[in-house]
Image (tube, rainbow, N blue to C red):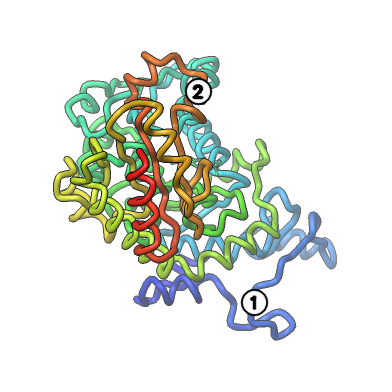
Amino acid sequence: MSKYKGVDGRGFSTRSVHAGESRKKHADAITTPIVQSSVYVFEDTAEIQKYVADKRTRFEYGRYGNPTQRVAEEKLAALEKTEDALLFSTGMSAVTTALLAFLSKGDHLVVTDDCYRKTRTFCETTLARLGVDTTFVPAGDYEALRDAMTGKTKVVLTETPTNPHLRVIDVPRAAKIAAARKAKLFVDSTLATPYNLQALTLGADLVIHSATKYLGGHNDLLAGVVMGPASVVDPVRDLQGQLGGTIDPHCAYLLLRGLKTLALRVEKHNRNGLAMARFLEGYPKIEEVYYPGLETHPDYAIAKEQMKGSGGVVSFLIKGGSDETLRFIDNLKLPYLGPSFGGVESLVYHPATLTFNDMPRAKREKLGIGDNLVRYAAGIEDEEDIIADLDRALRVV
Ligand SMILES: *Cc1c(COP(=O)(O)O)cnc(C)c1O
């Protein structure tokens, strides 16, 4: 893969459409084909020898990559303005494979605490079982981050914005703290997207996304990606060859299709998210709103400096308890009720009854997951309709 293929100084939307795509088209068809094959065959042994000398020239076996996947990877690398991208079957496969590639028995990992539930579980159970120790530090507490670092710390993993409390991490500051201990900074920037945040240019060593969310964008696929310099992505690729979390060619095609409209969609998510947050802030039945695009948010200044927009996810507290909150959710008519975010359809989610229902109340409340916490992931519907629906459901509370 050539360095920065398809960037050429062109804008984000142009790269979304054209980067990674060959101008010489298979069967003259404008779209990249779904190459649905597990095996790639050689003409003769000389061709095998040419291939083993430079593995980037063609394909061998589907677990090590396929042509549709490669186009999507080159497009993603161009969007994130970096050298290499590697796609996975899910976001969790990307997160776990990246961590396993850089952590061995006796190593130490630091993770910011407002993080994806399964990422936390992986650190607390699987990594612990393999002899890797994890320290969780409060997102946004840079003193705690510095204090948690030891001579054994190999990786710092942070999400930004975090979920569900939407803290925004000062990436250059976190990168400096990690680098002082020769640790790598991994940033899960799923909520940000490459449109809103370019964490690699701010000092991250590796960026991870659940492509299931905004990158795919249509609630119809599962995928993950890691991106960064080849020197950091290569060990992850080697381990993916062993663990096998490869993306399917058909899924890579769906992702390619979604990526072409990423800028348009994220612009709309940004507008809807901000409109919702402004509407909810100060609404009498709302106790608190978490959205980094609001001037009252603790990370507003960092978000303004680092991010183009704050995305479509807004979390908030309903005044009252479980009864009021569930009544509000059940009275919403526009969003679907379910987990996830980043697709064209709005989704509303109640963390206490779904993802955290098995966690003792005291522990989940310590993580800020109270009965009255709601996460609303705005889709790309008209903001007037989203707000009218919110207003109507809040009146019933
Ligand atoms: C959804 C998500 C993941 C996991 O991705 P999957 O595609 O569901 O496996 C990881 N990190 C963050 C921040 C997420 O939102």
At 77% across and 61% down in the image, what residue appears? 36
> At numbered mark 1, what does the secondary structure look like: helix, strand or loop?
loop
Q: Position of residue 125 (x, y in %)?
A: 52, 18
> At numbered mark 2, what does the secondary structure look like: helix, strand or loop?
loop
Q: Position of residue 212 (x, y in %)?
A: 54, 50
In the picture of the structure, the residue carrying the numbered disc 1 is 31
Q: Position of residue 387 (x, y in %)?
A: 34, 57
State the separation of the CA atoms marked 1 and 2. Answer: 44 Å
What is the residue that sits farthest to the front in this orientation? 396
Q: Is mark 1 within 8 Å of ligand 1?
A: no
Look at label 2 and name its amino acid: Asn
In this rendering, the answer to whether 130 lies above or below 1 is above
In this rendering, the answer to whether 321 lies above or below 198 is above
At 44% across and 27% down in the image, what residue appears? 352
Choose between 355 and 93: the one closer to the eye: 355
In this rendering, the answer to whether 105 lies above or below 213 is above
Q: Quadrant of the N terminus?
A: bottom right
Look at label 1 and name its amino acid: Thr
In the picture of the structure, the residue carrying the numbered disc 2 is 357
Disc 1 + disc 2, Cβ < 8 Å: no
